[in-house]
Image (cartoon, helix red, strand yellow):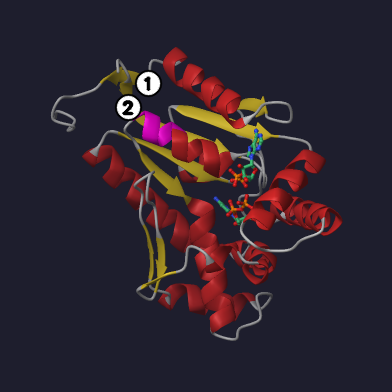
Amino acid sequence: MGHGELRGVVALDGPSGTGKSSVARKLAAALGARYLDTGAMYRAVALAVLRAGVDPADAERVAAVAATADLVQTTDPEASTTTLDGTDVGAEIRGPEVTTAVSPVSAVPEVRELLVAEQRRIIAEALEQVGGIVVEGRDIGTAVAPSAELKVYLTADAHARAQRRSRQDAASGRAASLDQTLADVRRRDDYDSTRAVSPLRPAEDAVELDTTSLDLPATLAALLELVEDRGLRVAAQPTGRVGG
Ligand SMILES: Nc1ncnc2c1ncn2[C@@H]1O[C@H](COP(=O)(O)OP(=O)(O)O)[C@@H](O)[C@H]1O
Ligand SMILES: Nc1ccn([C@H]2C[C@H](O)[C@@H](COP(=O)(O)OP(=O)(O)O)O2)c(=O)n1
């Protein structure tokens, strides 16, 4: 089809509902790259905390749960999975209990230390195996992969983001009023941007992209253009392996 493959790391950061997961997945698939959803990893730790009956605000006990949780995040953009203690928790980690618990859990420094190390390991493995990876989260450009070849910070106004999230929740059978979702989006924005360790903020060298009036195809097209402009898209290797 004349499409090339991604060489390097694309870091995609921004608050909830800006389209990170949707476009990161599509971008990776279009570019023959791996896809890493770091939010899913924080959500899985939050689920482990809830399952252990630990208060998400009890940093010390949260750190202890994180240290023993058996968490595996896979990176196929068409079929990425999150497993906790051997079972798939992909659906459960999107529920309201986990969404409420995840901000305090992700603010615990020991949790971040553990997950960032694992994320860097996954990124290195992807670069070695397929040459490229799209990583989405809150601190990818600032902390996890500061030398990423392309950093994009997605934004959109809170109302638009709440509307998207509320539609998405309704589609997956979770009732949520728009007011409640907006309040929830604002609470998490605030919590994530004011925490002491790796708060949500654009990296200095990030390209900011406002998706308020862009649909998903237009957002994806803008990202593909940035990848091309940086020369990160190279002719596909017939063997699918990067030479030494
Ligand atoms: N630009 C957009 N236009 C319309 N809907 C969008 C857009 N970006 C995301 N959505 C929808 O909003 C919801 C949340 O998107 P998602 O990719 O999960 O965002 P994030 O990972 O940033 O929280 C999804 O249902 C998605 O289809
Ligand atoms: N790199 C990351 C990714 C997510 N987090 C935290 C902060 C977020 O509120 C939660 C959940 O992230 P996730 O991307 O799944 O959330 P949304 O899909 O945007 O609602 O995890 C983080 O601290 N650092």
- Classify the position of the N terminus by image quarter: top left
Which is more N-terminal, label 1 or label 2?
2
Can residue 142 be seen at all in this image of the molecule? no
Magenta portion: prevailing SS class: helix
Residue at x 47% of width, y 22% of height: 224
Please determine whether, in this image, residue 181 is positioned above or below residue 62: above
Helix, strand or loop under label 1: loop
In percent of width and height, residue 58 lies at: 66, 79
Task: Check disc 1 and report the residue beneath it.
Answer: 232
Q: Are marks 2 and 1 in contact (CB under 8 Å)?
A: yes
Name the amino acid, label 1. Answer: Leu
Question: For the residues marked 2 and 1, what is the alpha-carbon distance in whole angstroms?
Answer: 5 Å
Residue at x 63% of width, y 62% of height: 107
Task: Check disc 2 and report the residue beneath it.
Answer: 7
- Front residue (pair 213, 131): 213
- Front residue (pair 202, 229): 229
The magenta stretch spans residue 20: no
Please determine whether, in this image, residue 209 is positioned above or below residue 86: above
The magenta stretch spans residue 30: yes
Can residue 123 be seen at all in this image of the molecule? yes
Where, by quadrant of the figure, is residue 210 drawn?
Answer: top right
**Mark 1 surroundings: few (<14), some (14-19) or many (≥20) residues within 10 A:** many
User: Where in the image, quadrant-wise, is ligand 1 located?
Assistant: top right
73 lies left or right of 204: left
Residue range of the region highlighted in magenta in the rendering: 27-31
In percent of width and height, residue 10 lies at: 45, 32
Where, by quadrant of the figure, is residue 15 drawn?
Answer: top right
Helix, strand or loop under label 2: loop
Please determine whether, in this image, residue 243 is positioned above or below residue 194: above
Residue at x 66% of width, y 69% of height: 101
Name the amino acid, label 2. Answer: Arg
In percent of width and height, residue 9 lies at: 40, 33
